[in-house]
Image (cartoon, rainbow, N blue to C red):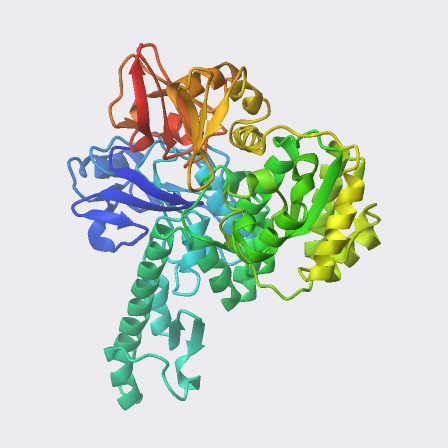
Amino acid sequence: MTRYFEVLKRDGPARIGKLLLERAIGTPALITGNDYASCGSLFRYASQDEATSCASALKGHKKLAIAPFVPAGLHSEPALRLPPTEIEGPKGVVIHAFSSEKPEEADVYVLASAGCLRNPRDLVAAVVGVRERTSPDTAIYAPALATPANLAFLVYLGVDLIDSTKTVADAYFGRYHTHDGVYALDELTELPCRCESCRRLADDRDGPIQGLLAGHNLLKLEEELLAVREAIRHESIREYVERQVRVTPDLTAALRLLDQEHRYLEARTPQSRHSILYANTAESLRRVEVTRYAERVLQRYRAPPSDVLLLLPCSARKPYSTSRSHRLFAEAIRPWHRRLHELILTSPLALVPRELEEVYPAASYDVPVTGRWDLEERAWLLGCLDAYLQKNSYRAVVAHLEGELEEALKEHGIDAIYTGGGTSGPALERLAAAVKDACCDAKRLQDWRLQRYRAVADYYFGEGAGDALLEGEVTVRGRELQDDKKRPLAASTPNGSLALSIAGARRLEPLGRYIVTIGEFVPKGSLLAPGVVDADEQIRPGDEVLIRGDRAFGVGRARMSGWEMVGSSRGVAAELRKIKER
């Protein structure tokens, strides 16, 4: 718990925050020795009492006061454990990355031996381990580790504070840092930078260069920090990191290792983003947004009871139904569209039911289109399709696909009527003929708008939510779902999510999901974390949530994950949309 650090925005483990010291520091940030006062190692004192008295001397200090610590090797436990240090004001505690001991409460945790974390496996394990052992509203400071090349990954990993120690020290060894890596200065014919330090270096490399080189390295670190902060604000840090880790094999390996920490990433990744998801690399297949979407389609989503499944290719334009190709498909199957179910096959999302095409990220992603499917993409798609067909059975499957996608399904043994795909006149005639034959005597499905509401409710609130929301006589007017008395239950938003009314929320309340329990008060405007008594651990930033307390009931949008709401002492837990006093 902290009084001096607050997280303001999240994009995965990367965070924009505010640390209140002598100056308010916006994180992720570059801090200097002027921002903190450290008691240092226990072994510099004659006794433990003397070390404790040093910490007491920092009472009322406006800087970050870092308590005394016991040094230890990277993979070793400290030889002894110090009692908690009482410090008034912002408190820093040195934490050993691989220690099993629970650290004392602090505002900032200083990662011991951070500069020694050169192995990608050690780096990922260290920061993930520290993050999971500390409160969500505390900051991590990794000294002597950051460079312009690795800074984006460090922030995405979960580091909030860095310093210039490594880049400045490297200047005295003739190392020239850039966004794209580090070079030996004497091996550069031309300097790829036009900062003042580099202009002077270009004119005279025979003079004292260490100070100029340190100035350049520091400038590049500061520039990269600004770029990273903007990437978080624009909700594109993952895309930025996927580009940046190509600088070295070690950074690429580190990202792949981090992606294996799925639970860590998923618990910190917002439900949706305002930016487009660019799936430009092989690592994009393992992104949380991709795997979460596929898991929900296979686990939460329940397909309508259709006899016929139509498999279609994706389109460049999203949602698919607004594209030229899908409008042509819709026209070709119009007489039978109420007797079949449409499923779009795509990379990297694998499967997109037509009812979920407006849900993030299905309506907001882009991928390089070559017509070629590599082995990893094929395995991911076919694995998801096998699981889907095992859960949902159909009398007939029509596949209007072409090229390698059609070939992949045939080689995998998917039993379907293959029409060859395409949008030409003959191709659409083949599609219409195949669908007509397959839909002969097929059962008629309910209103598609109700199908969509049921599917989206299940997607966001779990299996059974759609049935609860659509219980009784309900109708859809425009984008609003209404009960038999024309009272609104929910509305579909432009980004494909649901905005519940109080009446709709009460229908979902018995399911016991996505509920934030508060104390005996009526919140106004925003619900702050200290007012949260309990919260569903499934809640992620951006989720629609039910606010429930002894004196109030309402709905809103989560600003932090459910586990963060419970563990935080600062910050906005949820933005309220409607609240009703009991």
Q: Residue at x 62, y 54 (%)?
A: 328
Q: Residue furthest front?
A: 335
Q: Residue at x 50, y 17 (%)?
A: 512
Q: Dividing the image into 4 quarters, which one contains the C terminus?
A: top left
The answer to whether any part of residue 67 appears in the image is no
Q: Is residue 117 placed above or below 65 in the rendered structure?
A: below
Residue 460 image offset from top left, x and y in percent: 51, 31
Residue 348 image offset from top left, x and y in percent: 61, 52
Residue 400 image offset from top left, x and y in percent: 73, 52
Viewer-closest of 101 and 198: 198
Residue 529 image offset from top left, x and y in percent: 32, 27
Q: Dividing the image into 4 quarters, which one contains the N terminus?
A: top left
Q: Is residue 88 placed above or below 321 in the rendered structure?
A: above
Residue 41 falls in image quadrant: top left
Viewer-closest of 506 and 114: 506
The answer to whether any part of residue 454 appears in the image is yes
Answer left or right for 531 relative to 324: left
Residue 569 falls in image quadrant: top left
Q: Residue at x 57, y 41 (%)?
A: 293
Q: How many marks?
A: 0
Viewer-closest of 50 and 168: 168
Q: Is residue 315 placed above or below 76 in the rendered structure?
A: below
Answer left or right for 293 relative to 71: right
